[in-house]
Image (tube, grey):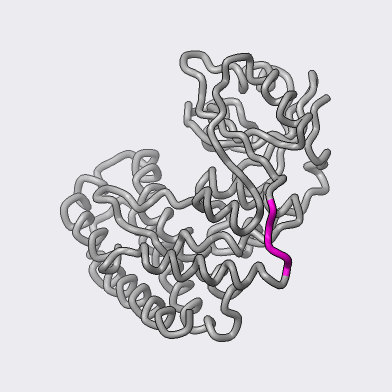
Amino acid sequence: MSTLLGLDPSTYQPHRVHRADFGYPETNCWTDVIIELLHAHGREPLAGLGCTLALDHEGDQFTFFKPRPDELEALFGVDVHELQPYRPLRSHVDSQIAQGRTLIVEVDGWWLPDTAGTAYRNQHVKTAVAVDTLDDKKLVYFHNAGLHVLRGEDLERVLVPEVLPGYVEVVRFDGERPSPEELPVVARELMRDNLLRRPARSPFVAFGEQLARELDDVLALSPEQVHVFAFATTRMAGAAMALAAAHVRWVLGDAGAEAAEALDAASATTRTLTMRLMRRKPFDPSALIDALNADWSRAHELLDTVA
């Protein structure tokens, strides 16, 4: 058996942003994995989510946000870098866990039972998992909103790509990190850095322009295709706004309350917009886009004052 922390999926308690009462309990696969890895190691992932404040619209989708490697090192002493898989993945997992590290592995969601109802045995979708325990009978892994286990054929197939090997990263936890008292100070410095990285105008202006061009075509798609569109647009933006609000509250406390409320309002509006898209019936999104722009702008005006 190779085991990092030896956690039990039946008793594991995920971080609070992955609980059902959070606005977006699943965000994107990589960020969800790193949140749970940090949480399982007793480190507060909310300190490292300033990347959400730099969210932009990329022309056809919102930024697939994730903490930068330099942020993870500065805040948590965690180093994430690419691993070259020149041997079977099982061998690399064994080697890295023996050194107190783990792997984040790109795999096919077809073999992940926690995606039952979506990808599991239904769609071939790439996603990222992090390994906690691996032996001949089970794989315990972080994915999406928590910790899960797979066995049998799923275990036999998930780490053996049929065509090309997936992207693999090694995660090291042995770097120097700030003390609990220093952590909010470092997080605030990185918050300011991320605010400097944000787009010059609200990213929802550009998204409104995209919707104006594409809405009729999107509404003509199948439900599955609309879901894919929403994941890259409204759901990605909404998850970023929800995590940004939580980050602002953790870093700034009461001083950031108004900005966090504006970010939460933007996140709620994205959920409304997603539901309208999923109905696949014509509608005018302009009022929702205006609300998103107003809340984003209000939040960032406040952050420029208090951050």
What residue is rendered at 23% in x and 68% in y? 286
Relative image position of residue 138 (x, y in whole percent): 77, 26
Q: Quadrant of the N terminus?
A: top right
* Quadrant hosting residue 87: top right
Q: Is residue 274 magenta?
A: no
Identify which residue is drawn at 18% across, 57% down: 212
Q: Is residue 293 above or below residue 144?
A: below
| Left or right: residue 174 compared with residue 111 | right
Q: Which residue is drawn at 37% across and 52% down?
A: 63
Magenta range is 176-180
Number of numbered discs visible in the structure rendering: 0
Q: Is residue 105 above or below residue 212?
A: above
Task: Name the residue: 51% across, 25% down.
Answer: 166
Q: Where is residue 204 in the image (x, y as percent from the top left)?
A: 29, 64
Q: Which of 184 and 205 is in front in this view?
A: 184
Relative image position of residue 46 (x, y in whole percent)? 61, 63
Front one among 111 and 69: 69
Indicate yes or no whether the magenta region holds residue 177: yes
Residue 49 position (above or below residue 136): below
Residue 127: % across, % down: 52, 35
- What's the magenta bit mostly, secondary-structure-wise? loop
Name the image quarter holding residue 305: bottom left
Can I make out residue 238 in this image? yes
